[in-house]
Amino acid sequence: METATFPDVLTMGGDCRLTLNAKGVNKYHCMPEPMANALFRGSCTCNIPTAEAFQAAEATYTAIKNEELTVGEIMEGVRSRIKVLYKLPAGTEIFLCPSGSDAEYIPLLIAKTLNKGRKVVNIVTCDSEVGSGTLDAAGGRYFSEAVPFPSEQSGPASKIMSQPLEGLAGAVECVAIPARCTTSSTVVDSSDPVQTIVDRCAREEAVPIVHCVHGSKTGIVEPFPDTNFGKMVATRDAFIVVDACQGRFTNKWLQNYIREGAMVLITGSKFFRGAPFSGAVLVPGELIERLARTEVDMPEGLAKFITQNEVPAALPNWRETLSKQNNVGLALRWVQALAEMEPTLSIPEEEREAGCDRWREHVLAGVAEFPDQLERFDGGDGCTSIVSIRLKKAGGGFLKVAEAKKVFEWMTQDLSNKLVSPSAAACCYIGQPVSITKEDCIVRLALGSDSLRDFLANGEQALAVDSLIIQKLALLTDKYLELSA
């Protein structure tokens, strides 16, 4: 990794989602460098880096090569800058991770470290609308066939996905609660199922980790768990993890939840437009103090995902159990994210939220102009910077996931040689299809940090981009059978 050239190094130190195919793009049709003519509203899935973020990463890469900076220094700087940007409560510390999926390993290890010998029950809510690797990772299992730091024993033929991560998966039960009813697309209220599982944990003397999601793939925002933990709260035998990996939240919300004792998962590679992928776990100071006093049994498998650099200096007992390898790709991806976070978070929260509201109104009005092809989906309106859209079939009904995936890919292509329309030539990046029932799915338009700033600075010009994207989406939906022939 340390001998890799730029920008190839941006695709290293992660999982198989970073792998480029023969066309030089990943599974989401994105490349690790800016595309000048691309129209981008896909930050809810995967990002093409902005020019500013790309330049910041390239300058940092040069500094590493010239031995002006070390990866360890960069990672410490990333932690410090995140703390300042979010005004995190005193004592909060940050683990850095190759993605939001890998980040799930950290709360699991924390729970096991502070409750040695006890079973851990990891309760994942909003299933199917969080990261595709969440369930495996929350269960202490591999979520990809590729890892950031493969061992010398692992060969290309090794099949590890969903297999237990060495030293972490033992005495772990992962329970999934779906995001929606499979037949009606109604959002599931997870409070009663969670309480049932927590009550079982109390009887079994198991340790529950309760998730809640702030911004799912379609924008679902779950309330902070009001579960009755009983004596487990007083004895600190229960944990709360908030999945905020979309990055669509306010500083006040984040600060309050950390003060409530929750561990929060964030990324720099969704709303903030960093290249795929970069994750972090924000851990309250009280937990950090307990961890510093407790011996950790570092799982052998976790060394394939994090090194000393990714662990906060407040936990020297954790650091000394890990290697001194450098994840250059992850460091540069976080540098990219911060190049977007800093100018965006300098805008007052009220102004950002009002901008998202106005943008959403425009997009919904644009969707309404194509009633025969597009239909807004209202099942996840807790987040105003994501708009979900169903694609209509000519004979009735809606496109299924496999069909919508074709539209998702066609959106990124110049189709002016096949379709006569001003929008056909536009290369547009949107959010990938998400299933909302067994039969139906949606695609998404999502603001990113750069497009929000563009909208606030020059609204009409930014909204023209959204209008063109909607026009092409309607065109491809209308011509689906023709293009599929």
Image (cartoon, rainbow, N blue to C red):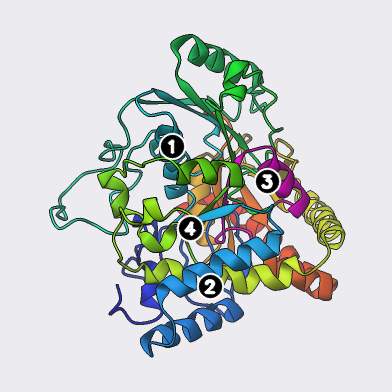
Q: In which quarter of the image is residue 167?
A: top left
SS for dot 2: helix
> What is the spatial separation of the Cα atoms under label 2 and label 1, in whole angstroms?
27 Å
- Residue at numbered disc 2: 335
Q: Which amino acid does label 3 sit on?
A: Ser
The answer to if 251 sits in the magenta stretch is yes
Q: Quadrant of residue 26?
A: bottom left
Q: Mark 2 or mark 3: which comes first in sequence?
A: 2
Q: Residues within 10 Å of mark 2 (few under 14, many from 20)?
A: many
> What is the spatial separation of the Cα atoms under label 4 and label 1, in whole angstroms?
17 Å
Q: Residue at x 70, y 39 (%)?
A: 380
Q: Are marks 2 and 3 in contact (CB under 8 Å)?
A: no
Foreground of the two, 96 or 4? 96
Q: Which residue is drawn at 69% across and 64% down?
A: 85
Q: Mark 4 or mark 1: which comes first in sequence?
A: 1
Q: Which amino acid does label 2 sit on?
A: Val
The dot on residue 388 is: 3
What residue range appears in magenta?
A: 249-271
| Residue 248, percent from left and from top | 69, 52
The dot on residue 312 is: 4
> What is the spatial separation of the Cα atoms under label 2 and label 3, in whole angstroms?
30 Å
Residue located farthest toward the top when viewing the structure as drawn:
203
Q: Quadrant of residue 327?
A: bottom left
| Residue 176, percent from left and from top | 49, 26
Q: What residue type is labelled 1?
A: Leu
